[in-house]
Amino acid sequence: MITRVPRKPVIDALREEWSVLDTLAHSLSDEQWAAPSILPGWSVSDIYAHIVGTEWMLTGREVAPTRDVSTLDHVRNPIGEFNEHWLDFYRARSRQQLMDDFAKVTTQRLTALDGLAVQQWDAETQTPVGPDSYGRFMRVRVFDCWAHEIDIRDSLGLGVPDDVVPATAARKEMAASLPFIVGKRVGASAGTAVTVAFTGLVPRAVHIAVEDRAALVPALDGPADVTLRVDLVDYARLIGGRSTADPASVHIEGDHALGEKIVANLHYMI
């Protein structure tokens, strides 16, 4: 089933998140820019190179490999190899060149997105979460960029994101993955009801009911079998398998065994 995602809120969230990342980059000292990040093998500047490279890819631009990166410890698949080639490209360029390209490619992407017809936005395409609408893909992009803002801040001890616009879109994308986690990864039985109460910047309770398959529902018919309370930023760290992730940040109410199984299966991002 294709996910139809409202267009304007997602494009606005991308615009806002890219503005936040640009402002953050220009606030960093050269030492912070070059500092190791929490992501294995990557510096803070490499995170920016990754974001820029991904957006260039969406314009159709490619970069030629300069070495074999498949044997690097932190590279596990072709997507990881693709990422490394863009990092190598920007490691050979200055900070100013990278940020100039950040401005250039994000401007191009926003112009392209603003010009899409509804049929193009809703059209099926391959996304990081499987075949779905192009709009869903762009919501994933919001989440990815927002999660990398967390990575940058965690790497430098700069607190957590504070802009509600991208955080709201990211929360919706994270919520959309919950039926997959509860139904497929955990294998919860029919009749199971789960609530995930996101706290923090954009609090919201999300409900999952398992019948023939797990699905998001507006409300449950009765009490949840288990409720997980977790700050949105902590949840993003957990699903990304970050070194800063802390399973104890999730407070479990109700069926603790089921809750612990869900927490143990949260890491699904590549």
Image (spheres, rainbow, N blue to C red):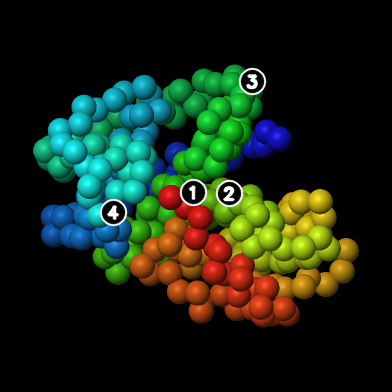
Instruction: Tell me what residue is drawn at x 88 percent, y 63 percent.
Output: 221
Camera-near label (3 vs 4) is 4
Q: Tell me where residue 233 appears, x and y as whole percent.
A: 48, 64
**Disc 3 marks which amino acid?**
Gln
Q: Tell me where residue 149 appears, x and y as whole percent.
A: 37, 54
- Mark 2 or mark 1: name the one nearer the start of the chain: 1
Give the camera-side residue of 172 and 221.
221
Give the camera-side residue of 23 and 219.
219
Q: In which quarter of the image is residue 255?
A: bottom right
Mark 2 touches mark 3? (CB < 8 Å): no
Q: Quick check: can you spot residue 129?
A: yes
In whole angstroms, how far apart are the C-alphas of marks 4 and 2?
A: 25 Å
Instruction: Tell me what residue is drawn at x 43 percent, y 69 percent.
Output: 245
Q: Is residue 63 found left or right of 222 in the rendered image?
A: left
Query: Which residue is label 2 attached to?
Result: 173
Q: Indicate which disc residue 48 carries.
A: none
